[in-house]
Image: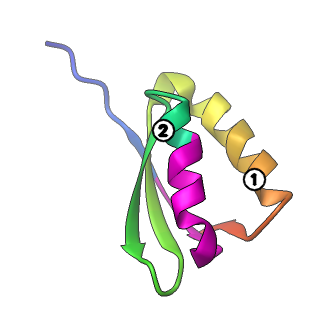
Amino acid sequence: MNQMKMLHREYRVDRTRIGFIKFIFEAYEGIAVITTLDARTGHVRMAIAPDLAQEAFRIIADLQKDFEFHAL
């Protein structure tokens, strides 16, 4: 089985929006998986499918218009 390497990126997000962010990416099946590293500070890690990275980054750019979503 050929297993693809995921791209890993960490972000600081509005901690009150972590559930919303997870929900958004779950709605786009297979684009990314969000893991909360520190809920208190809004520190999350995204495992992004490489062939869908551009789409994931477009979603992130849209979310950044509405609330804190900064690359670490």
Magenta span contains residue 20:
yes
Q: Secondary structure at mark 1?
A: helix
Which color scheme did the rendering employ for the protein?
Answer: rainbow
Residue 35, picture quadrant: bottom left
Which residue does the numbered mark 2 point to in the structure image? 26
Left or right of 1: which side holds 18?
Answer: right
Give the amino acid type for the residue marked by disc 2 in the picture: Glu
Depth check, mark 2 against mark 1: the one in front is 2
Q: Residue 36 in the image: state x and y as whole percent.
A: 40, 67
Q: Quadrant of the C terminus?
A: bottom right
Q: Which residues are magenta?
A: 9-24
Which residue does the numbered mark 1 point to in the structure image? 63
Residue 56, picture quadrant: top right
Instruction: Say which of 65 and 8 sits in front.
Output: 65
Outermost residue on the right side: it is: 65
Please give the name of the residue rendered at 73% of the width and 71% of the height, measured from the top-left corner. Answer: 68
- Relative to 12, does residue 71 appear above or below in the rendering? above
Q: Residue 13 in the image: state x and y as whole percent.
A: 62, 70
Bin the neighbour count of mark 2 within 10 Å (Cα to Cα): few under 14, some 14-19, many 20 and up. Answer: some
Q: Residue 47 in the image: state x and y as whole percent.
A: 41, 46
Outermost residue on the left side: it is: 1
Please give the name of the residue rendered at 30% of the width and 25% of the height, measured from the top-left corner. Answer: 4
Residue 28, picture quadrant: top right
Instruction: Say which of 72 and 14 sits in front.
Output: 14
Q: Secondary structure at mark 2?
A: helix
Q: Quadrant of the N terminus?
A: top left
Left or right of 66: which side holds 46?
Answer: left
Do the residues bearing badges 2 and 1 touch, measured as CB atoms within 8 Å?
A: no
Left or right of 21: which side holds 64?
Answer: right
Helix, strand or loop for the magenta stretch, by majority: helix
Please give the name of the residue rendered at 59% of the width and 43% of the height, measured from the top-left corner. Answer: 24
Please give the name of the residue rendered at 53% of the width and 77% of the height, measured from the top-left corner. Answer: 42
